[in-house]
Image (cartoon, rainbow, N blue to C red):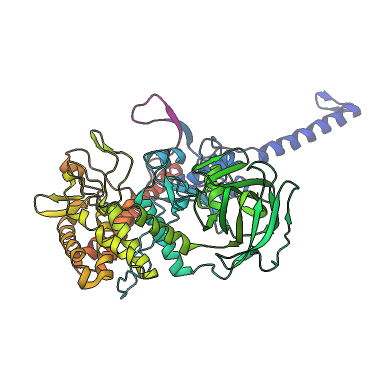
Amino acid sequence: MRLGPFCLHKPSLKLFLACSFTFVITLYVFWNGCEVPSTFPTKKSEEIRGVPQTAADCSKVIAKTSNEEDEQSEKTELSLNKPADQNVCPNEERIDVVVNGEKNKLEGRLVGSEAYVPFSFVKGYFEIYGELQEVDGRTVLDWRHSYSEVHSAKADSAYETKAPFLWFETYHVEGRTRVKCISGIEEVPVSSQWNQKGHFYPIQIAQYGLSHYNMLQLDGDSEGKEKIFEDAETVSDVNWNWSAPKTAQIANVFDKERNSRVFQFSTTGLSGEGVSLSVDSATKDFIITFDLLLRGEVRVSIVVEIDNADFYTVHYTTNNDLVSSTDSEVFYGVGHWNGWRRIVRNLDTDMRKGFKLPEKKNMKRGKIALTEIQSITLRGRGSIDNISLAHSAHAHSFMAAAKWLLRHQNEQGNWPITVKRKVVDGVTLLPDWYSAMAQGQALSLLTRAYLYTKTPAYLRAALRATKLFKVKSKDKGVLTTFMNQYPWYEEYPTSPSLFVLNGFIYSLLGLYDLKLTAGPQHGTEAAELFDQGMRSLKAMLPLYDTGSGSFYDLRHVTMRIAPNLARWDYHTLHVSLLYFLASIDPDPILRTTAARWEGYTKERERNIIESVHHDANRDFIRSVSPAGVL
């Protein structure tokens, strides 16, 4: 067959057609499967490839792709270390980010004229908060200056001491990272702030008591709702039974002191086989309670299950050790005592502190939950009664803190802080210093303990605590004066003075609580100290206004060093405290200052967001407009 100058035989024609068909199919596949860069995104290309149309949209894609790697292991932890797909966003390129001229560099992104840096760096550098969240089916970055919120007193409600203290029901003191554990002996938090070995910090203890007081007032307690595992009188509705090796003994006996039946046990040593109570109880309640009488050394061991998979043991031993742990066991010392004592422990808190597990509100390694109590084992010699499990024990925790204040108030009526505190270079408070904030929050707790129990000892302790407010800081007190005119109660009694704002207001609230509780007959001194402090606060409040936030203290005035701008969590604390003071004192300066300071956070956020949107839209217009046309 002849076609023009070319001759094709039939077999060659078939081969030609097959090759042509293959070429067309291959071209079609490559054309539709590959991304074709374009500075003019179209609706069709967006549907096919999901290419964002603006620089602002690109930032979302960058944030999403940068987090894929870290989300495999820690879904709640932000990390922007994985490179974003360079072909996803138009006009995007990688750039080096140099911070303060340092040699170490970060990898950033440049989209148009907008630069992006890893949020994980921003988060740590500026002490802000943020995490990825799913909202209405979309992934969003929840960025906050602080997780603390502005609180205010209810409209037309008068401040009352017997009412909950401020908003402290939101304070989960035992969950703080700077709380080492809850002492098995004192039953209050042990602080690791300023000293990793641990110490009893009066402010932290008072806040622990006040937070549980608030929850007691708002939610009540579990009294009468406990799940009883064993009371030696009745048969529990849970599946349990005692088991004892041949070398151990357990007997149900009548105790004259308690006028009830109890279980008396005896084993050889604290580490061998013990007398066990099989519980095998799935639960969402974590407060274990039992009454214990010592007839020698005793160890109570509780086996718990976590995430329906792993088993751990919490031991409570009659020694003075604080806390220690191995791979699967944690040990708390509960001390020694005479007679019967009720032990109340939060198993969830003891597990997390003992094994350094993440707290529920800040879980960085997935969800960790105590799901079941397997058994309770007794070792040593003693008697036990009323083994039960409850959802809460707010009254016990509240009163444990109040009793600690009674036991540890010194003869002068104060609570010394037993560790040194470096405030700034060259200014350090030596151990056994005092704090007006500690005194004030102790007053707020003791007055509520008095109103709750009607026990005079709590009110007497509160009245003794006012003496320190009249002792000058240079004489190991807390009183200083600004400009030789305005008395001030120091949270940190340094020289020169700091004039910390939040600690001063807390001291005023404590004095006001005592004024209300003691009444005109005994509360005159507290009333005078409160009124004196309020006059100083109103006069000095403008000094703390930065025009866009607030100062934590006045060190830039008294020490002539760089100002200490309040972090946003402290700034919102300032606002909230002023709102509550405004419910006590009608002077307009309190409420107007609080409202203006609250507006600073919203105004700053609004201005920054509007600026970012403006820049992003401008870059997009430039990228899609013909040269010279905007």
> Residue 356's x, y, as percent?
53, 42
Which quadrant, please, contains the N terminus?
top right
Q: Residue at x 34, y 71 (%)?
A: 154
Q: Is residue 353 covered in magenta?
A: no
Q: Say whether residue 293 is visible.
A: yes
- Magenta span dominant secondary structure: strand
Q: In the figure, 194 relative to 572: above or below?
A: above
Query: Is 105 included in the stretch rendered in magenta?
Result: yes
Q: How far from the left and from the top, in percent, is residue 601?
A: 32, 55
- Front one among 294 and 551: 294
As drawn, which residue projects farthest toward the front? 256
Inspect this view and state whether residue 41 appears. no
In the image, taking residue 72 as reference, residue 569 lies left or right, namely left
Task: Identify which residue, 276 or 327, lies in the foreground.
Answer: 276
Residue under the point 42% across and 60% down: 211
Q: Residue furthest left?
A: 484
- For image coordinates 33% across by 56% down, the residue present is 572
Number of labels in the image equals 0
Q: Nearer the viewer, residue 372 or 298?
A: 298
- Magenta stretch bounds: 96-110
